Image (cartoon, rainbow, N blue to C red):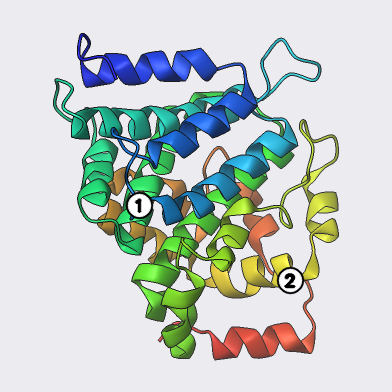
């Protein structure tokens, strides 16, 4: 790591170098968990959830170069770059490069580096994701309706995974004791929440309308989204805004309906489709208390 540049400039250079190579993006993300010296053993287990989320993006093709065939997504690439930028900047600062944290997200990454716990990891990771959502809303508006729908699903999932770990009663009601285990980012279950492979289609761009994708969603994923997550979205966003120190997050939900690049008038897509008896039992069992 060169000390000739400040932390922000060094981080920007790392991101520019991998911008059009999804495999290199993954490798850069993995390196941030090794710290500035390459010896950060307590941080390495947290790569699992982070890489699950990014591998899913790379697999869909959204991180492809804009010159590729098919090209990647301008919005998804920008969101991913914010995560990489924040991670690289925090590593640079912890390694002694000059500068102050450029954002709240970077401050939270430094807290994670100093004390690598599940809650601190989620705060840092989700602060970067939320900051990117807020910063790039105009890019999101240019995506298809189906893609914008799933942007909201993805955001709800990452916020819910955080709540499992840090606010389990909000996330699971009477089964709160299971929350920290299910939401531990070092374990496989959290990676399953964040990979979204059973929620979103595996290719980009999306060619069909939203209703077709909702109908085709894997039953377990649909139950999680409509039975467990959607009914508690309003308190989930409120809790997340306070937890991340980002009150602007509250502008992305209205009366319990996600509205990120999505019109409130089309909130019917968030209404529960017909569910089996098991889903109704699950809804009662996990109701927030």
Nearer the observer, disc 2 or disc 1? 1
Res. 140 in view: no
Residue shown at 39% from the left, 81% from the top: 169
Counting from the top left corner in percent of width and height, residue 16 is at 47, 13
Q: The C terminus lies in which quarter of the figure?
A: bottom left
Q: Check residue 157 in the rendering and tell me which mark sits there, or answer none.
A: none
Residue shown at 28% from the left, 43% from the top: 109
In this rendering, position of residue 200 left or right of residue 230 = right
Q: Secondary structure at mark 1?
A: loop
Q: Is residue 262 above or below residue 27?
A: below
Residue shown at 32% from the left, 42% from the top: 39
Counting from the top left corner in percent of width and height, residue 199 is at 71, 55
Residue 68 sits in which quadrant? top right
Q: Check residue 41 in the rendering and tell me which mark sits there, or answer none.
A: 1
In this rendering, position of residue 9 left or right of residue 270 = left
Of 125 and 27, nearer the camera is 27
Counting from the top left corner in percent of width and height, residue 153 is at 60, 52
CB of mark 2 within 8 Å of CB of mark 1? no
Read off the residue under disc 2: 220
In this rendering, position of residue 189 left or right of residue 128 = right
* Badge 1: residue crowd in 10 Å (few <14, some 14–19, many ≥20): few
Counting from the top left corner in percent of width and height, residue 210 is at 77, 47
Q: The N terminus lies in which quarter of the figure?
A: top left
Q: CA distance from mark 2 to mark 1?
A: 34 Å
Of 59 and 163, nearer the camera is 59
Q: Secondary structure at mark 2?
A: helix
Res. 201 in view: yes
Residue 15 sits in which quadrant? top left
Of 258 and 229, nearer the camera is 229
Residue shown at 36% from the left, 35% from the top: 87
Residue 240 sits in which quadrant? bottom left
């Amino acid at each position: 790591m060169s000390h000739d540049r400040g932390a922000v400039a060094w981080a920007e250079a790392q991101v520019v170098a991998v911008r059009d190579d999804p495999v290199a993006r993954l490798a850069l993300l993995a390196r941030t968990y090794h710290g500035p010296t390459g010896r950060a053993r307590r941080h390495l287990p947290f790569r699992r959830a982070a890489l699950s989320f990014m591998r899913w993006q790379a697999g869909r093709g959204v991180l492809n170069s804009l010159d590729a065939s098919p090209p990647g997504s301008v919005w998804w690439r920008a969101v991913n770059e914010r995560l990489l930028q924040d991670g690289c900047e925090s590593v640079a600062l912890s390694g002694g490069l000059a500068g102050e944290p450029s954002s709240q997200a970077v401050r939270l990454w430094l807290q994670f580096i100093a004390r690598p716990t599940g809650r601190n990891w989620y705060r840092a990771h989700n602060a970067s994701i939320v900051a990117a959502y807020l910063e790039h809303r105009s890019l999101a508006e240019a995506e298809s309706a189906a893609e914008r729908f799933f942007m909201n699903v993805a955001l709800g999932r990452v916020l819910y995974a955080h709540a499992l770990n840090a606010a389990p009663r909000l996330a699971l009601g009477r089964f709160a004791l299971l929350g920290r285990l299910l939401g531990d980012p070092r374990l496989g279950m959290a990676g399953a929440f964040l990979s979204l492979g059973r929620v979103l289609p595996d290719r980009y761009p999306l060619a069909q309308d939203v209703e077709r994708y909702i109908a085709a969603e894997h039953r377990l994923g649909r139950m999680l989204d409509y039975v467990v997550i959607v009914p508690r979205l309003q308190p989930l966003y409120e809790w997340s805004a306070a937890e991340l120190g980002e009150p602007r997050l509250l502008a992305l939900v209205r009366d319990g309906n996600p509205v990120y690049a999505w019109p409130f008038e089309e909130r019917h897509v968030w209404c529960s489709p017909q569910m089996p008896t098991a889903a109704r039992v699950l809804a009662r069992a996990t109701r927030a208390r």
